[in-house]
Image: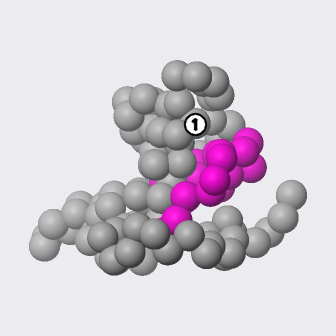
């Protein structure tokens, strides 16, 4: 397993322009991407703060870029939102996301 984050994967697809400054999604979601995504949403979990909800990891307003990326990857992987929330609640960055092909 590579230690490099999927976010560094080269992206030449700039067709979406400046609409969303989010981290690009992988062209297709592999098991490894899904694993990264679980880690991203768990590590970048929301934390309640006096000023609102922030990312536990980088203190950006929640959801931060990585959290959004992880959630979108897991959604592409076929996970319903509730299941992603359950993963975040469990708080295990090494959890194996269930694979729902075609969901
Ligand atoms: Zn974050």
Could you tell me if residue 86 is visible in this image? no
At 52% across and 22% down in the image, what residue appears? 103
At 66% across and 47% down in the image, what residue appears? 28
Where residue 80 sits, quadrant-wise, is top left
Asked if 84 appears above or below 21 in the picture, the reply is: above
Asked if 31 appears above or below 47 in the picture, the reply is: above
Left or right: where does residue 30 sit relative to residue 80? right
The outermost residue toward the left is: 51
Asked if 16 appears above or below 68 in the picture, the reply is: below
Secondary structure under the numbered disc 1 in the rendered image: loop
Instruction: Give the residue number, with chain letter if any, for mark 1.
Output: 77
Q: Residues within 10 Å of mark 1 (few under 14, many from 20)?
A: many
At 45% across and 49% down in the image, what residue appears? 71
Foreground of the two, 102 or 55 = 102
Asked if 103 appears above or below 34 in the picture, the reply is: above
Left or right: where does residue 78 sit relative to residue 5? left
Q: Is residue 92 magenta?
A: no
Residues shaded magenta: 22-41
| Residue 93 x/y as whole percent | 61, 51
Report the number of discs: 1
The quadrant of the rendering that contains the N terminus is bottom right
Where residue 19 sits, quadrant-wise, is bottom left
The outermost residue toward the front is: 15
| Residue 44 x/y as whole percent | 45, 62
Pointer 1 residue Cβ closer than 8 Å to ligand 1: no
| Residue 67 x/y as whole percent | 43, 59
Could you tell me if residue 101 is visible in this image? yes
Where residue 97 sits, quadrant-wise, is top right
| Residue 22 x/y as whole percent | 41, 69
Foreground of the two, 94 or 70 = 70
């Amino acid at each position: 397993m590579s230690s490099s984050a999927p976010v560094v994967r080269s992206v030449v697809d700039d067709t979406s322009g400046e609409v969303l400054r989010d981290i690009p999604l992988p062209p297709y979601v592999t098991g490894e991407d899904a694993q990264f995504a679980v880690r991203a949403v768990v590590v970048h979990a929301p934390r309640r703060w006096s000023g609102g909800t922030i990312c536990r990891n980088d203190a950006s307003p929640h959801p931060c870029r990585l959290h959004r990326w992880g959630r979108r990857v897991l959604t592409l992987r076929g996970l319903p939102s509730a299941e992603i929330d359950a993963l975040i609640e469990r708080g295990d960055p090494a959890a194996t996301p269930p694979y729902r092909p075609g969901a």
